[in-house]
């Protein structure tokens, strides 16, 4: 009956209760959606890192990661690979030869990491094959042994890009709100190919003026950029026996992941050819990358794989990328800090409302005490009213937050205008918010706790009332 | 047999550092089945005396024995529990719970006493029928007249089967017809079911019906007449 009275009591002043409920709803909606967005970004980053770069577990010679010397290979790597692939929760594993190199062309020279891979086996472990840019080549479809995949980022550094305004470029300019008159002017050079950036910029300045060119430079460059296939790049690197090698590779494709730092350094070549060039035997690898079904039992599997060859260094995703581990763990704490701050602020609103409730009902509370309602029951009644106010708003806010998360999680939220900045930090510009059930349960408990804490002060005020005075009062 | 015995009762309030001696040494007793009115001018100590009898306030000196139990010895939850089981209250401003129906208001005190749902439903219906509100069981206080609300308050006071009912100015907010109606009901309950009623009142109509009139002045008993 007390539950029923409390429920009915909150609707005695509908407007006031609704104001509190709406405030809690908005607060919780913002908090839940903000957390979902952050969780989505972090998970996406972790997933991208696992699927494009690191995989779940890596095995190396214990010295290899210190100096990347050619001699530090994993002995009998093929045998180890097949043993790893026999483990039930392992999706796939692949061996790589990795060598630090200097990439040189007629324009410049930059450092790079050559990843010599078996293209078909690599497909099972990483998704580089899915990240080949449209109209920028293929994933090793070329029969050439000296085929190489480089990133669009490295292409820019090596200046092997060219510029051409196409229908797609015009569409993109329209979508990012480049003024119509500028687009009309740009359309006059549609399909004209500029082999050098400075020629393209000079033409732009002539067409739309220096000021507009500077204003829209980044978009005008990025969206008109095309990549030269079959460009030759010389790589200088150390062979298996320490001797220096100079070899020419032909670009067959350009890839682009969400992490420009990874893209900037990594190039991919065919393993068989590279091993022959460098003098490695067929049974060696610098790195074995392992993809698991999921990361639920990653610690246990790391140990299991380590047991295959205890002399090798077997490390999992979090050990390879401690920044990511810190980020994943810290964000869990951050979510709750955010929720607690929002609930703390909302709690004051509830305290205020409940104080008004108590002050308005002094006479009634006096009567309840007089006829035999004890202090515990009065406290429970006021606390339930406070909990109802917070939990209605909390549940509605969380539900709306979860619905928005579900919708955007399914369709993605494209924030193309910030793509460059996001990608420079290794994040995708299409965000997929995510929420965990545990978080919703934790937040619900915090909302209930807020209701309880917010009721303490008003309830204490009520309990201090003298029934005789309260009955005679005007309220 | 006396159900209430009051001995040398004093109550001193402190208001803005000034001591107010509201009740000054009252000795009194009430028997089962009395229909008594406490009268006197404003400030004579009627309400204070009634609050002391009901355990809503504590005496500065003296004792109140209800069926042999010393009220002044009871504190906190024991006092609340004692009040709930032994004393019924009817207040000037009805003081019903506005979000509950007439029936739920009557049932509420039985719920506090732990009475079963079936028993609550039966007794609340009987009591409301007895006070002439058998047709308004499911009306909320806001939909009832002042007289009807006060009758619900009487039914509520009776619901816990108390030893006596204290009614503080029960007719002060009622018109003549409602007052007459309410007094007739209380008189009938007193006569037929031997329920003890003690009123504090200014209302001549209540005084006329009462069979014992205790007049207070300056916190003391001026007259104690039995008709």
Image (spheres, rainbow, N blue to C red):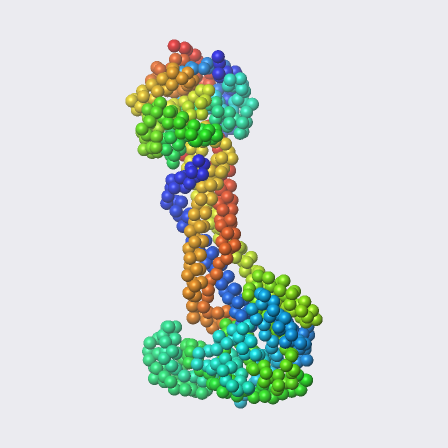
Q: Answer yes or no: is residue A423 visible.
A: yes
Q: Nearer the viewer, residue A227 or B18?
A: A227
Question: What is the x, y in percent for residue A9?
Answer: 41, 39
The single residue placed furthest to the right in the displayed view is A311
Where is residue A99? Give x, y as percent: 62, 80
Front residue of B180/B127: it is B127
| Residue A108 found in image quarter | bottom right
Q: Residue at x 38, y 23 (%)?
A: B169
Q: Compared with residue A132, is residue B164 higher up or lower down, i.e. above or below? A: above
Asked if residue A57 is positioned above or below residue B106 in the image, the reply reads: below
Q: Residue at x 44, y 63 (%)?
A: A409
Q: Position of residue B225 (x, y in %)?
A: 41, 11
| Count of numbered marks | 0
Q: Which quarter of the rendered picture does the C terminus of chain B lie within? A: top left
Instruction: Please report the residue visible at 39 percent of the width from the left and 48 percent of the height from the top.
Output: A19
Is residue B41 in sight in this rendering? Answer: no
Left/right placement of residue B136 relative to residue B26 reads left
**x%, y% of residue B188?**
36, 17
> Residue at left 35%, top 78%?
A183
């Amino acid at each position: 009956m007390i539950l029923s009275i409390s429920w009915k009591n909150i609707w005695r002043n509908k407007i006031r209760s609704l104001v509190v409920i709406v405030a809690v709803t908005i607060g919780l909606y913002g908090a839940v959606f903000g957390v979902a967005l952050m969780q989505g970004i972090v998970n996406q980053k972790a997933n991208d890192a696992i699927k494009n770069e690191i995989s779940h577990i890596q095995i190396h010679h214990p010295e290899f990661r210190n100096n990347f010397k050619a001699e530090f290979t994993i002995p009998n790597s093929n045998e180890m690979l097949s043993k790893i692939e026999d483990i039930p929760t392992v999706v796939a594993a692949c061996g790589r030869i990795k060598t630090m190199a200097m990439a040189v062309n007629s324009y410049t020279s930059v450092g790079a990491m050559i990843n010599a891979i078996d293209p078909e086996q690599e497909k099972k472990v990483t998704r580089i094959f899915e990240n080949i840019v449209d109209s920028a080549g293929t994933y090793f479809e070329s029969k050439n042994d000296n085929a190489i995949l480089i990133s669009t980022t490295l292409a820019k550094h090596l200046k092997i890009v060219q510029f051409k305004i196409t229908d797609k470029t015009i569409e993109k300019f329209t979508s990012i709100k480049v003024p119509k008159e500028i687009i009309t002017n740009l359309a006059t050079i549609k399909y004209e190919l500029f082999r050098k950036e400075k020629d393209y910029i000079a033409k732009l300045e002539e067409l739309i003026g220096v000021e507009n060119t500077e204003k829209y430079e980044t978009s005008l460059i990025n969206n008109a950029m095309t990549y030269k296939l079959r460009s030759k790049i010389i790589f200088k690197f150390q062979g298996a026996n320490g001797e220096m090698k100079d070899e020419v590779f032909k670009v067959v494709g350009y890839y682009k992941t969400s992490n420009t730092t990874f893209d900037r350094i990594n190039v991919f070549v065919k393993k068989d050819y590279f091993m022959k060039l460098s003098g490695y035997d067929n049974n060696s690898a610098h790195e074995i990358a392992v993809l698991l079904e999921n990361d639920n039992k990653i610690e246990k599997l790391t140990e299991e794989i380590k047991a295959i060859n205890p002399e090798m260094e077997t490390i999992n995703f979090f050990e390879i990328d401690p920044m990511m581990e810190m980020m994943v763990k810290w964000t869990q704490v951050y979510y709750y800090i955010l929720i607690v701050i929002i609930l703390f602020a909302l709690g004051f609103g509830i305290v205020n409302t409940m104080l008004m409730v108590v002050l308005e009902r002094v006479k009634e509370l006096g009567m309840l005490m007089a006829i035999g309602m004890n202090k515990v029951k009065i406290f429970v009644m006021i606390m339930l009213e406070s909990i109802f106010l917070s939990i209605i708003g909390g549940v509605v806010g969380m539900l709306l937050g979860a619905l928005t998360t579900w919708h955007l999680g399914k369709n993605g939220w494209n924030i193309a205008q910030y793509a460059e900045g996001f990608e420079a930090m290794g994040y995708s510009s299409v965000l997929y918010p995510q929420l965990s059930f545990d978080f919703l349960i934790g937040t619900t408990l915090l909302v209930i706790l807020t209701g309880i804490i917010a009721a303490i002060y008003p309830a204490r005020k009520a309990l201090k009332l003298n029934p005789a005075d309260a009955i005679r009062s005007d309220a | 047999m006396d159900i209430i015995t009051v001995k040398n009762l004093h109550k001193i309030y402190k208001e803005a550092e000034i001591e107010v001696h509201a009740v000054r040494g009252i000795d009194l007793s009430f028997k089962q089945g009395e229909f008594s009115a406490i009268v006197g001018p404003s400030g004579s100590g009627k309400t204070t005396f009634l609050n002391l009898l009901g355990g809503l306030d504590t005496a500065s000196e003296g004792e109140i024995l209800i069926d042999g139990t010393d009220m002044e010895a009871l504190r906190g939850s024991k006092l609340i529990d004692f009040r709930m089981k032994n004393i019924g209250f009817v207040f000037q401003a009805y003081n019903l719970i506005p979000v509950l129906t007439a029936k739920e208001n009557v049932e509420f005190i039985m719920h506090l006493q732990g009475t079963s749902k079936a028993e609550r439903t039966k007794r609340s219906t009987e009591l409301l029928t007895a006070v002439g509100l058998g047709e308004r069981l499911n009306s909320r206080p806001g939909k009832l007249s002042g007289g009807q609300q006060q009758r619900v308050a009487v039914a509520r006071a009776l619901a816990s089967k108390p030893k006596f009912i204290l009614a503080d100015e029960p007719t002060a907010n009622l018109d003549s017809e409602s007052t007459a109606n309410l007094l007739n009901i209380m008189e009938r309950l007193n006569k037929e079911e031997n329920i003890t009623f003690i009123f504090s009142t200014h209302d001549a109509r209540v005084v006329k019906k009462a069979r014992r009139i205790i007049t207070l002045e300056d916190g003391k008993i001026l007259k104690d007449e039995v008709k």
